Amino acid sequence: MAARLGLNRRTLISRSMIALLAVPTSRARAEPAVIKVGYLRWAVRRPTISLLDKPASDNGLAGARLAMSDNNTTGRFLNQQFDLLDVPIAAADDAAQALETLAQQGVGLIVTDVPAQSLLALSAAAAQHQVMLFDVGAPDDALRQEQCRANVIHVAPSRRMLTDALGQYLVWKKWTRWVLAYGAHPEDALLADAYRQTAKRFGARIVKEIQYKDTDGARQTDSGVVQTQQQMPVFTQGLPDYDVLVTADENEVFAGYLPYRTWDARPVVGSAGLRAVTWDPSSESWGGAQVQDRFIRMFHRRMTPLDMQAWTASRMIGEAANRSGTGDAATIVSFMKKPDFAVAAYKGEPLSIRDWDLQVRQPILLSDGRNVVSVSPQPGFLHQVTDLDTLGVDRPETKCKLS
């Protein structure tokens, strides 16, 4: 019959398949669960001492995009789709209004790298819309203490976590006599105070404190090589005997000029020299080389700490969504807060959330800008739960009261 109609076997099979696809069936694949993730991105960038440190326009955003690609790789098998909505915020913009716009689009999970005061404003707006924020940019300890919020998960390490990571290494090296040099900006004062608490916690001694007075001049024109070479030795002259110069300079005003220019031949750490960071482009252990390669292929530059923090927040969302099998934001967050939840982040130990202040516990890399010198927690700094809790404010010390 088929031959008389001019049809061959292959034609019959093809038409049968088309007919089968056209028949409605309960077995047809459902539409994927769409998980929308917002990124409220601080578009204001501070000037840097070195042109090599000038941040890319997509700093942070690129890390989130890489993570969303990773999420969708797994999500395709689980019928989940992850969408990233990028919203840059300038200093004059209303961050709360930007959050409300995202919430109206069905976004319940928002990554953000805004400063502390803007984050508090976002938290108030987020509470009205049942939105969870993932802080990847604000290191303020107050946000994890007196000003902690139940709708903010801190992926960025606190200042105390960073200073404790560096302080552990200095104490392990028996470099326990510190000179603390700090800048004139409010952030510098907060960082300096974190170093004081770290020194007290681990038994180091700050033998002298010196403050660098910022003149607010134009950095590129007012700071020549000759002037800096004369100024920095004088700034560090006449100090008592010390092992290391610890610098607190978040606004990058002076610390970058100190290495090789101090009066005495001493190492510089903190905001220059040996630094505590969440990520370094030279990190290749625990699969670090692979994530770096993927990042470079996608964005044609190296991965920064902010990229890694945004990647981590976005991957936490993806991991919790994949494992819980849901696209509901509240269920994803609830799963993420479970004691057994963890996510790998190419740093040797899984990352999890502290239940007393919603800070993500994590190893901290110590980098000289070319290599990873060490990773904290350091050997010998022990904790009854996890050694990661030797970095930052521990449960018995916390002033956070989550409602």
Image (cartoon, rainbow, N blue to C red):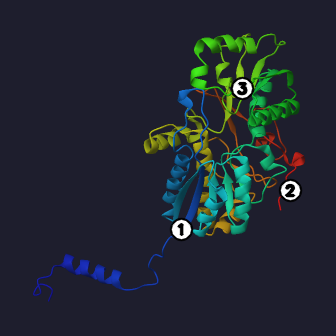
Q: Can you say which quadrant of the picture contains the C terminus?
A: bottom right
Mark 2 is surrounded, within 10 Å at the Cα level, by few (under 14), some (14 to 19) or many (20 or more) other residues, namely some
Q: Nearer the viewer, residue 29 or 58?
A: 58
Instruction: Kindly identify the amino acid type of the residue bearing the numbered disc 2.
Output: Lys
Q: CA distance from mark 2 to mark 3?
A: 37 Å
- Looking at the rendering, which quadrant does residue 107 occupy? bottom right
Q: In the drawing, what numbered circle is on residue 401?
A: 2
- Looking at the rendering, which quadrant does residue 236 occupy? top right
Q: In the drawing, what numbered circle is on residue 403?
A: none
Q: Can you say which quadrant of the picture contains the N terminus?
A: bottom left
Callout 1: SS:
strand
User: Do the numbered discs 1 and 3 sit on residues whose CB atoms are within 8 Å?
Assistant: no
Q: In the drawing, what numbered circle is on residue 214?
A: 3
Instruction: Kindly identify the amino acid type of the residue bearing the numbered disc 1.
Output: Val
Callout 3: SS:
loop
Q: Which percent across, then down, holds residue 100?
A: 63, 64
First-in-chain label (1 vs 3) = 1
From this viewpoint, is residue 180 visible? yes
Q: In the drawing, what numbered circle is on residue 34?
A: 1
Instruction: Kindly identify the amino acid type of the residue bearing the numbered disc 3.
Output: Asp
Numbered disc in front, either 2 or 3? 3
Image position of 61 with respect to 370: above or below: below
Q: Is 163 left, or right, of 240 in this rendering?
A: left
Q: Which percent across, then down, holds residue 247?
A: 74, 26
Image position of 86 with respect to 309: above or below: below
Callout 2: SS:
loop
